[in-house]
Amino acid sequence: MSETELIEAAKLAAQSSYSPYSNYPVGAALLFADGSVVTGTNVENASYGLGLCAETVAVAKAMADGLRSGLTAVAVTGPSDRGDGAPITPCGRCRQVLNELAALGGTDPVIYCVGENQVNEVQLSQLLPHAFGPAHLD
Ligand code: THU
């Protein structure tokens, strides 16, 4: 799957966002080495602090389906009508959640951070340097 297709998958996932409190729909799409794609979107809660981010939902879906390795790329999209059009960037918690799945398979996925007119490509290791991961508990 191409970068463009992965971004489109993330945008499609965002259409299912449950974000009535922030009105800030986010989409995430995970690409694995075997070609499989798992998407997620943010799921908020009337108890505001319990909301789940799109990337976290995608990782939970993938791991619940048994995926443990080969995380190759991640696309993250935000709403086009909010902010200054700058690319979205995964929140700190999501970086850590993504790192767990990446570390299990020994990959450093590229993260496509999608903005209005540009896509920032960064490695997860750039977003989360010196990460704490499962190896620390060996
Ligand atoms: N959000 C995500 O889904 N992913 C991020 O990386 C940043 C923020 C969601 C959380 C909340 O539902 C909404 O965006 C506004 O913060």
Image: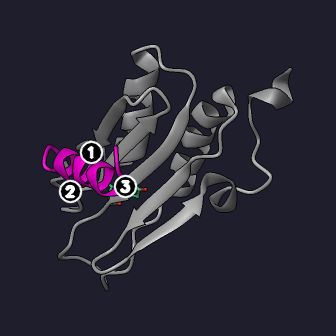
When asked about the image quadrant of residue 119, the answer is: bottom left
Residue pointed to by mark 3:
3
Assess mark 1: CB under 8 A from ligand 1? yes
Q: Kindly identify which residue carries mark 2.
A: 21
Q: Is mark 2 within 8 Å of ligand 1?
A: yes
Q: Amino acid at mark 3?
A: Glu
Residue 32 in the image: above or below residue 64? below
Task: Label 2: state its secondary structure.
Answer: loop
| CB within 8 Å, label 2 to label 3 | no
Please say if the residues under marks 1 and 2 sit with CB atoms less than 8 Å apart: yes
Horizontal side of residue 123 vs 65, given as left or right: right
Query: Residue shown at 39%/15% (left/top)?
Result: 65
Indicate which disc residue 44 carries. 1
Name the residue rendered at 57%, 55% in the picture.
92
Q: Residue 35's x, y, as percent?
A: 39, 31
Q: Residues within 10 Å of mark 3 (few under 14, many from 20)?
A: some
Horizontally, residue 115 falls left or right of residue 13, namely: right
Q: Which disc number belongs to residue 18? A: none
Residue 46: percent from left, percent from top: 23, 44
Residue 82 at what x, y percent from top left?
A: 23, 76
Q: What element does badge 1 sit on?
A: loop
Q: How many angstroms separate mark 2 from mark 3 (CA)?
A: 30 Å
Which amino acid is tagged 2? Tyr
Pointer 2: residues within 10 angstroms few (<14), some, or many (20+)? few
Start-end of magenta stretch = 1-17
Three-letter amino acid code of the residue under disc 1: Glu
**Distance of label 1 from label 2 (alpha carbons):** 7 Å
Q: Is residue 117 visible?
A: yes
Marked residue nearer the N-terminal end (1 or 2): 2
